[in-house]
Amino acid sequence: MKKILHERQKIQKIILWIALLLTASLFLLPTSSLKIVGAVIVLALLSSFYLSLWISAIDALYFVKWIPIAKLTEGDWLVEDVRANGRLLCSTRQPCLDETHITLMKREGIKKAKIKVGIPFVPAIFLATAGTVVLYFAA
């Protein structure tokens, strides 16, 4: 997490300055309800930044793995470009591997590739849950 925080140091400083300015401006608001809304906005701004740091750290630790070429399957997502003899074999611009990429890497003698693994059906489960909550409260 320290490495990711160091990479995003400029963003952190900007968010902290915005939060400081918003907090200072809360004292100028006339009603307490506006102050509460402003405080919630400041807390949401700060917590969303640090939550994104935490998610990025978890992603880098647990969802990025080195896999032997023999175990690669179509649809795996590359994290880094694959190069052999200074030549680009597979790019992260087209991260989803297909059979031609895998055979090309085998032919060039590449031993491992860095891929991103995921949890199946997470987007579908999230969308179904969000849709259920929205429909429940809309009725």
Image (spheres, rainbow, N blue to C red):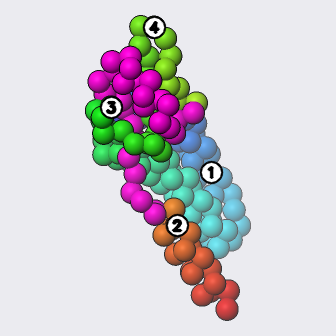
The residue at which mark 4 appears reads as 86
The residue at which mark 3 appears reads as 69
Secondary structure of the residue carrying numbered label 2: helix
The residue at which mark 2 appears reads as 124
The residue at which mark 1 appears reads as 22
Image quarter (top left, top right, bottom left or bottom right) of the N terminus: top left
| Count of number-bearing discs | 4
* Nearest the eye: 104 or 45: 104
Q: Amino acid at mark 2?
A: Ala
Q: Residues within 10 Å of mark 3 (few under 14, many from 20)?
A: some
Instruction: Give coordinates of residue 113: x percent, y percent.
Output: 36, 29
**Residue that sits furthest to the top in the current view:** 85
Regarding residue 21, the answer to whether it shows in the image is yes
Closer to the eye: label 4 or 2: 4
Q: CA distance from mark 1 to mark 2?
A: 37 Å
**Mark sitting earlier along the chain (3/2):** 3
